[in-house]
């Protein structure tokens, strides 16, 4: 059947996916995926089954069943580990800003409506901020080399390291080093300005 799948016969893939779905469902009962339902675990198992069909080698000593069993288990375990990693915690425990701020709120005031505005409404603060920005830009202009200025210009335009390296005919490591130097110079300027004010 795996050979038929590789020859492009979709019915063979459908047959294998249907035949081994019970195995996937059985495996999925043993795992919990944070922030997801049982169907999501089954879906991960089906992805593992598909990978088994794709990667199975006829010359191996293991049967397809054993190979599929391992691929399904690994896919589910990978998904479970990914869902429990700390770096995904904000995604798994988020609170919508459109949610009502209070449980008994009949007017449905959203959390977003209660957050303070980030806009600066004081004209004096705006002018001072713009003057400070121009001073920082001027100081940075004086401290950067010609190469660093070119790198910064492209970086601000949203061009990635590799593209900048291609445009400037330099290795991508040189671009990374230049950006690190720019960052350090900018931090020094900001520290000096903070001490003055």
Image (cartoon, grey):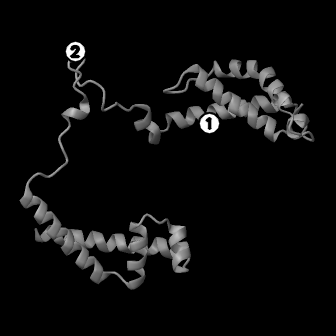
Q: Secondary structure at mark 2?
A: loop
**Mark sitting earlier along the chain (2/1):** 1
Image point 23% across, 69% down: which residue?
190
Image point 80% across, 41% down: which residue?
55
Image point 45% across, 42% down: which residue?
87
What is the x, y in percent for residue 72?
71, 30
Mark 2 in CB contact with mark 1 (< 8 angstroms): no
Q: Which mark is residue 78?
A: 1
Position of 164 with respect to 111 (left or right) is: right
Q: Quadrant of the rendered structure where residue 94 is?
A: top left
Q: Secondary structure at mark 1?
A: helix
Relative to the observer, which residue lies in front, 158 or 39?
158
What is the x, y in percent for residue 165?
53, 74
Residue pointed to by mark 2: 104
Q: Residue furthest right?
A: 59
Q: Quadrant of the rendered structure where residue 4 is?
A: top right
What is the x, y in percent for residue 31?
60, 23
What is the x, y in percent for residue 181?
38, 74
Question: Looking at the rendering, in which quadrant would you find the N terminus?
Answer: top right
Question: Looking at the rendering, in which quadrant would you find the C terminus?
Answer: bottom left
Q: Nearer the viewer, mark 2 or mark 1?
A: 2
Image point 21% across, 16% down: which residue?
106
Position of 22 with respect to 160 (left or right) is: right
Relative to the observer, which residue lies in front, 73 or 43?
43
């Amino acid at each position: 059947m795996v050979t038929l799948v590789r020859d492009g016969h979709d019915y063979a893939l459908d047959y294998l996916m249907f035949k081994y779905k019970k195995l996937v469902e059985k495996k999925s009962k043993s795992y919990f995926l944070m922030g997801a339902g049982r169907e999501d675990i089954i879906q991960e198992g089906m992805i593992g089954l598909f990978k088994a069909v794709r990667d199975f080698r006829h010359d191996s000593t293991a049967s397809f069943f054993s190979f599929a069993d391992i691929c399904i288990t690994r896919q589910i375990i990978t998904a479970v580990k990914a869902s429990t990693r700390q770096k995904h915690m904000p995604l798994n425990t988020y609170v919508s800003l459109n949610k009502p701020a209070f449980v008994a709120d009949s007017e449905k005031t959203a959390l977003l409506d209660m957050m303070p505005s980030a806009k600066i409404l004081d004209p004096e603060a705006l002018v001072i901020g713009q003057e400070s920005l121009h001073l920082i830009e001027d100081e940075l202009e004086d401290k950067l080399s010609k190469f660093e200025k070119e790198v910064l210009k492209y970086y601000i335009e949203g061009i990635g390291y590799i593209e900048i390296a291609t445009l400037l005919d330099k290795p991508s490591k040189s671009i990374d080093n230049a950006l690190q130097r720019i960052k350090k110079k900018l931090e020094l300027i900001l520290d000096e300005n903070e001490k003055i004010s």
